[in-house]
Image: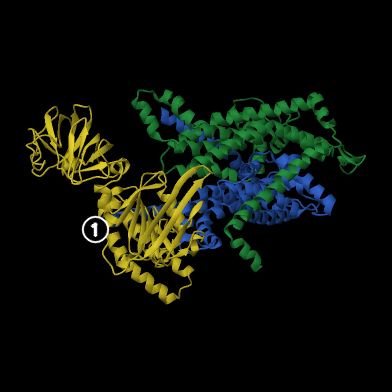
Chain colours: A yellow, B blue, C green
Amino acid sequence: MATAPKAKAVREDLLRVEGLTKIYDGAVKAVDNISLTVTTGEIFALLGGSGCGKSTLLRMLAGFETPTQGKIYLAGEDITHLPPYKRPINMMFQSYALFPHLSVWENIAFGLKRDGMPKNDINDRVESLLGLVQLTKLAKRKPHQLSGGQQQRVALARSLAKRPQLLLLDEPLGALDKKLRESTQLELVNIIEEVGVTCVLVTHDQEEAMTMASRIAVMSEGSFMQVGSPDEVYEMPNSRHVADFIGNVNIFDGVVEVDEPDHVTVRCEECVHYVGHGISGNTGMSVSVALRPEKILLSKNKPQGEFNKGKPQGEFNWCEGEVIEIVYFGAHTTYHLKLASGLVIKAQELNSTRDLSCGLTWGDRAYAHWSDLAMVVLTQ
Amino acid sequence: MNKIFSKSWMIAVYVFLYMPIITLVVFSFNDSQLVTVWSHASIRWYHVLVHDRELISAVALSLRIAFLSALLSVFFGTFTAFALNRYKRFRGRTLLSSMASTPLVMPDVIVGLSLLLMLVSMQQWWGFPERGLLTILLGHALLGTAYATVVVTSRLREMDGKLDEAAMDLGCQPFQVFKLVTLPLLAPALVSAFLLTFTLSFDDVVLSSFLSGPGYSTLPMVVFSRARLGLNPTINAVATVTITVVSIAVIVSSFYQSRAERKRKLEVAQAYSDSNQ
Amino acid sequence: MTKILSYLRDLRHGRTVVIGVPYLWFALLIAVPVLIVLKISLSEMETTSISSMISWADGWPTLKLNFSSYLFISGDTLYVQTYLSSIEYALITTIICLAIGYPFAYFMARSPKHLQPMLLMLIMLPFWTSFLLRIYAWKTLLVSNGAINNVLLALGIIHEPLAMMNNSFSLLVGMVYSYLPFMILPLYANLSKLDLRYLEAAADLGTSPFKAFWLITVPLSKAGIIAGSMLVFIPAVGEYVIPELLGGPNTLMIGRVLWDEFFSNNDWPMASSVAVVMILLILLPMALFNKYQSEQAEGKA
């Protein structure tokens, strides 16, 4: 599920958005000139903080907001100005919006009845959906008689009932508590893949986006910062903002010193980075080096250069600092290291044995070192 | 000390509120012509009441007006509440909300006078409407609309606007959304708005006095004209009948409401314990 | 018919109708009547009808305004006094209602949760029973041979009946009695929503309960105090039924004057002018009330 989309025979573009813009009150740009394509069978996540425009974008896809500019095409057809009740798109709402006066069965059948489907067909369809989300026994209950997880499954069944070409999910797991969320994530993706529906998902939770989506668009201030698969966005962020938004990151500012096709070095105040691949830049350019905490190793003694791949020992990819904070998470521990320049970096060490592996404590001097493939050079 | 003080304060207020009502009821069973001096218990004044033609026809008129006015009030009140709650931005919204809350606070004499003068002007131009049931009805419906708006608004605010969108998303056109989702959820509020506006109309004396024409006396108008002249035991009997009917209605409806609420809470608790097993 | 339906089906037209219907209704029954009252107050009384205000002189419409009734009101000490005493009675009523109602609402909001619906219903119940009959009930209680005097005489507390009827006392009792629920309900609604953690935080920071009440509870219930006071004050200024049934010759209230001008003297311009001045007097409190109402609406949205 967290892997790249499975290769199917032909992948067609299902949803195409061109230059979509939404301006409120003539001034506030909630969504700013966004274009995107979603292919059939994909789970596409819009990830961003509150107010980044992801919900507005989703609401425009559903038809609840009219775009100020731009076009929305579904399977080649222009649906920009189609009202929500005429779009072959269904939505699973944040906190579900189940009809409180209708039973589980009636909630799921609601959309089918509006289409004038024959009674027997409705029965069959609802029964099979109830089976799919394992709620057959609770069909007669009202929403308030269900737990949060059950309500979520009813909402999913209801949004799948009309077999929409595109399913929109608005913070699908936001209302569940943390423990339940993990198991539900898997369940949700399994059901979606079983049905084979294309999804656009909105979330502020990066973990949710990473585990569920095949592609992620990181949004900020109404624009896409980066679009890519979960591992691309995490391992190869294209900007400080994306690196910072997804996971933790240490950022070093520096200047490109050596620029070769197979490696570059970046001189920073704290250390010199030896990066084992080329970049699109040139000598003398100011860049940022992003380094994830889990890719840093700590030791009490000066590293012997095993990460420098035979380059002059002790010259690259290490720095020294004082341990000023230790945060224990159970599975791992994060150490905050204050360097001579004043920069504080975080290093995450896996607690692979029950005695804490590094044996570092507050006030200790420690050495941080990392591999030549651990970091990303950011030019913006 | 604090507890005793707060309890006695509350009891004193309830005594203040209920003492007049209780005396009214007690003295309605007094045989004496004097309302204030107890002689012995009887239902003499109820006999008088049943045979009082003027009172009976006034009751009939009041009931008719109250029923129609409550219908109109709920109808227009629902529209007003919708306009004010579902459309946050439109030109003249402030004016509409001010107009809708004006009858709540504006002294009755002003509302009555201004409505009457308008109706008189209309009559001068078009010869319509004649003062009577229709004009009283208009006044009561105006007052009722303001109250119904408040009741429906508070329910609309509680309701999740997302439900409308969900219905639309599943293929409902706007009118279907209203019929299939909004209206069923609004129903309890519409019932309470109906009962409230019915009572308001049944109780009003000032607007009716301004707006009625010859031959159209509502129950409060008759009661008022008799009360102005002095104390009258038949009024006690009328009061007792009204109070009994209203109290039973209010107590029964609030009993059902609280029972439904309790049942619902129990079911919610049940759902959570089920899912934790 | 089908044309109308398909017209309504369009989302934008639906919006026009939903806004338009209540707009027309209130415009017809509030705005137009008030304008007509304003117009009539500025015209002269002729035998049966109101004189036309616009006359055509040299082909130009000229507005004929007649301020005579306003001049009369402002010149006549009786009118001025009546307005002042109406405001005075309404103000005293509001203060007494607040003094009784605030502690009551506060205690009610602090009483056990399962009792609150019943306590609230007991406040509402008199409101559902006829206002007129409850005022009449006070009449039977307060007259010199009424229940209260009889009880006090029988207990030997007093030796001759107290004069409690047809004076400011009976008027104020009736006004406070009728308007008390209007004070209690918004106050209770406000106080019951008050987050007790504020008071706990205040106690935690070393504030005494008495000080906490003045520094936290009262300021936070300001909206309820304003709403309740306006709901009492504004209608009380123009009250007619209570002064008519419980007041006396010396308790001047403007509502009664308006009624008499209209029904006894048949002087419509005068009655209209009295109404217009009354509207001007309550305009500021009304604006306050409306501001509070819309703030409530926005706060919840």
- Which residue ends up furthest to the right in the rendered image? C58
Taking the image as shown, residue C177 lies to the left or right of residue A271, namely right
Residue B259 found in image quarter: bottom left
Residue C236 at x, y percent in the picture: 66, 34
The reply, left or right, for residue A160 in relation to residue B14 is left
Q: Secondary structure at mark 1?
A: loop
What residue did someone put label 1 on? A3
* Residue B231 visible in the picture: no
At x 67% / y 53%, what residue is drawn?
B69
In this rendering, position of residue B92 left or right of residue A97: right
Of the 4 image quadrants, the one containing the N terminus of chain A is bottom left
- Of residues C50 and A323, the one nearer the viewer is A323
Where residue B134 appears, as percent x and y from the top left, is 74, 54
- Is C275 or A267 nearer to us in this picture? A267
User: Can the viewer see residue A191 in this picture?
Assistant: yes
Judge left or right: residue B104 versus residue A378.
right
Image quadrant occupied by the C terminus of chain A: top left
Which of C210 and C22 lies nearest the eye of the viewer?
Answer: C22
Please give the count of numbered marks on the rendered protein. 1
User: Given the image, on which type of amino acid does mark 1 rest?
Assistant: Thr
Residue C38 occupies quadrant: top right
Residue at 9% across, 37% down: A312
**Disc 1 is attached to a residue of which chain?**
A
Q: Front-most of C213 and A232?
A: A232
Question: x%, y% of residue B148?
Answer: 60, 49
Position in image of residue B18 (x %, y %): 57, 40
Q: Residues within 10 Å of mark 1 (few under 14, many from 20)?
A: some
User: Is A322 rendered above or below residue C22?
Assistant: above
Residue B137 position (above or below residue C8): above
